[in-house]
Amino acid sequence: MPGPKDLDPSTSPRALLGAELRHAREKAGLSQDELGGRLFVSGPFIGQLEAGTRRMQREYAALLDDALGTEDFFRRNCAASAKSKYPEHFAEAAEAEAAATEIREYAPLLVPGLLQTPSYTRAVCRAYQPTAPDEVIESLVSARMERTRLLDDPTEPMLWVVLDEAALRLVTGGREVMAGVLAHIVALARRNRIIVQVLPFQAGAHAALEGAIKLMHFQDAPPLAYFEGVGTGRLEDDPAIVHHQRHTYDLLSACALPPQNSLALVEAMAQDYAHEEHP
């Protein structure tokens, strides 16, 4: 198993807390499991805090200060770590996403955030908040576009997406917007940056009828699953739950079209949208 990845404290308060936690734990001569036992959490939970894949909550900051004799270091710095440009229910997941080496996602009704274009995101955010001021919507669009910069790296994270055909046929923002976002997906796949499969309507009933799936794997921390509802979301690290979600994703992928067939379908739909918009 690879050793812990060195975190850059200058990248974020969360990275600083993770690096300091690892330093304080090792200085105290405690393993992750031993420290976790003092906080009534698992060793992997401590590993996620150190790796920066999980946000440190205030109650744990206080317990860490007491367990490690760090006075009020974690208490004082926890508030800065909690600040985020993302909605509260998604902030921790966005931070984990940025540290992931692999992401697998099934999208039943929407193009996933990492694959969206500004126009598509704007249409989604406006649908969520129809009376919000334009500046609020634009701040949300900006934050989501910042997330997509993860794909500027040529290799990591590995992103594998299964798109439900419903997400492709739900005309979000108009046909021109749909043509743009589907063409963007095609371009990413053509340069081998992402893996895309389409789950067609003809597949019928499948293992993920109950909702979306998002799985994240990391170099030096256990995998996470993210569950999201209307205005809510949570990260889950229970090995049994994560394993079940991975099994569900594998079944889903087996029902979907192969990548090349999927790409041909997405490209054809992008052209159809474009031609219908401009006869």
Image: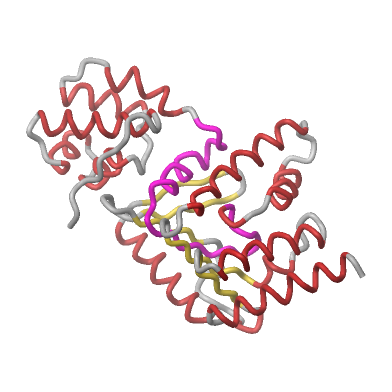
Is 223 placed above or below 50 here?
Answer: below
Residue 273 at what x, y percent from top left?
80, 68
Q: Residue at coordinates 9% horizontally, 29% vertically from top-left?
A: 28
Q: Is residue 108 magenta?
A: yes
Residue 184 quadrant = bottom right
Q: Residue at coordinates 72% horizontally, 46% vertically from top-left?
A: 122
Q: Nearer the viewer, residue 18 or 222?
A: 18
Is 246 placed above or below 152 here?
Answer: below
Q: Is residue 97 magenta?
A: yes
Q: Residue at coordinates 57% horizontally, 51% vertically from top-left?
A: 229
Q: Quadrant of the N terminus?
A: bottom left
Q: Residue furthest left?
A: 29
Residue 51 quadrant = top left
Is 81 placed above or below 217 here?
Answer: above
Q: Residue at coordinates 77% horizontally, 72% vertically from top-left?
A: 271
Q: Quadrant of the C terminus?
A: bottom right
Residue 174 at what x, y percent from top left?
82, 58
Q: Is residue 164 left or right of residue 170?
A: left
